[in-house]
Image (cartoon, helix red, strand yellow):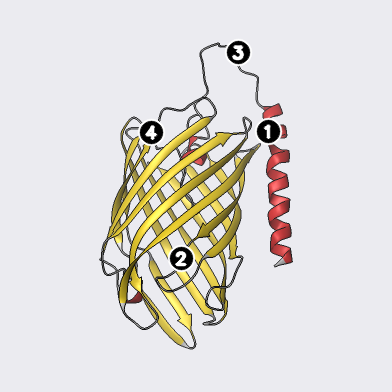
């Protein structure tokens, strides 16, 4: 635990330190009284607009007339009660820019493979549709809202069994030309199983805060804290920290590596995970 906290602190320090170095390498813009840089634009636009690999969402919508595909792989180890392993892929999320600052989203199912107490369970999550709307940028501030509706298309223990509703409020603030802090306030109405096997509906409040910083060479570091008020209908809250690195290859391809862990035990179990992913603008 202490090593993970230390790694997170080192990463946060590196993000702040990198903002100054990256800013020095960028040429100073010509004075313009009315021009305000677009925090969701420029050559590194894909880094700013991607939702993955963080848990919270970006405040930036993708550009009109573009399509962005996000996908990844995650391997989670559960320690303590119910110890085991879960593999999840390909985390597909497709975003379609239909108007200026408005996108439609297609949530296609993940495949899950869970091993616990010598038992293997596999299946797919539910599918869904969503949208994101980005408000006009306000100098250093960017605001957005997301809505997602999932339908009961999943299998086995990974299906909600009833529609799920998610509403997000996203905000980010540019601390410098290379560093930003952002937050997502997520409100979810979900269907799930209690430990007795009965299905019930429950609500989740999930705020997050993320610090990100770009380095020369189109690298980006981030560190994120997430709180979920419930992890299941009859289970308590969980806090998670995750951090990682992203690399932009050209203007249309991003790759990333991430690591995360829960900070408290829920029903006697803790989770640690590693993952990798990709973002592609078509």
Q: Can you identify the residue that label 3 sits on?
A: 30
Figure quadrant of residue 83: bottom right
Looking at the image, tell me whether mark 2 or mark 1 is earlier in sequence order. Answer: 1
Looking at the image, tell me whether mark 3 or mark 2 is earlier in sequence order. Answer: 3
- Asked if residue 113 can be seen in this view, the reply is yes
**Spatial CA span between label 3 and label 1:** 18 Å
The C terminus: image quadrant: top left
Residue at horizontal 65 percent and vertical 26 percent from the top: 26
Residue that extends furthest to the bottom in the rendered view of this protein: 118
Looking at the image, tell me whether mark 4 or mark 3 is earlier in sequence order. Answer: 3
Marks 1 and 4: in contact by CB < 8 Å?
no
Mark 3: secondary structure: loop
Q: Is residue 222 above or below residue 179?
A: below
Q: x and y percent of residue 40 in the render?
A: 48, 33
Mark 1: secondary structure: helix
Q: Bin the neighbour count of mark 4 within 10 Å (Cα to Cα): few under 14, some 14-19, many 20 and up.
A: many
**Spatial CA span between label 2 and label 1:** 39 Å
Figure quadrant of residue 20: top right
Residue at horizontal 31 percent and vertical 48 percent from the top: 130
Looking at the image, tell me whether mark 3 or mark 1 is earlier in sequence order. Answer: 1
**Spatial CA span between label 4 and label 1:** 25 Å
Eye-nearest disc, 2 or 1: 2
On residue 63, which mark appears?
A: 4
Marks 3 and 4: in contact by CB < 8 Å?
no
**Spatial CA span between label 4 and label 3:** 25 Å
Eye-nearest disc, 3 or 2: 2
Looking at the image, tell me whether mark 4 or mark 1 is earlier in sequence order. Answer: 1
Q: Can you identify the residue that label 2 sits on?
A: 230
Q: Can you identify the residue that label 1 sits on?
A: 22
**Spatial CA span between label 3 and label 2:** 50 Å
């Amino acid at each position: 635990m202490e090593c993970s906290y230390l790694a997170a602190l080192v990463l946060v320090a590196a993000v702040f330190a990198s903002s100054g170095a990256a800013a020095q390498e960028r040429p100073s813009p010509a004075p313009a009284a009315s021009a305000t840089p677009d925090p969701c634009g420029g050559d590194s636009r894909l880094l700013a607009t991607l939702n993955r690999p963080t848990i919270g969402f970006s405040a930036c919508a993708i550009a009109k007339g573009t399509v962005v595909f996000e996908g990844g792989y995650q391997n989670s180890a559960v320690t303590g009660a119910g110890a085991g392993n879960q593999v999840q892929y390909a985390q597909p999320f497709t975003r379609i820019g239909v108007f200026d600052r408005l996108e439609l989203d297609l949530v296609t199912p993940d495949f899950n493979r869970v091993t616990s107490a010598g038992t293997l369970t596999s299946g797919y999550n539910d599918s869904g549709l969503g949208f994101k709307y980005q408000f006009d940028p306000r100098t250093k501030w960017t605001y957005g809202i997301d809505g997602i509706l999932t339908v009961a298309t999943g299998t086995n223990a990974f299906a909600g069994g009833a529609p799920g509703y998610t509403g997000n409020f996203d905000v980010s603030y540019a601390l410098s030309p290379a560093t930003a802090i952002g937050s997502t306030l997520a409100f979810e109405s979900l269907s799930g199983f209690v430990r007795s096997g009965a299905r019930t509906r429950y609500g989740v409040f999930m705020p997050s805060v993320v610090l990100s910083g770009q380095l020369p060479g189109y690298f980006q570091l981030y560190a994120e804290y997430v709180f979920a008020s419930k992890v299941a209908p009859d289970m308590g809250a969980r806090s998670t920290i995750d951090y990682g690195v992203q690399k932009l290859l050209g203007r249309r391809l991003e790759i990333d590596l991430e690591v995360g862990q829960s900070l408290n035990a829920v029903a006697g179990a803790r989770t640690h995970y590693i993952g990798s992913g990709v973002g592609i603008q078509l």
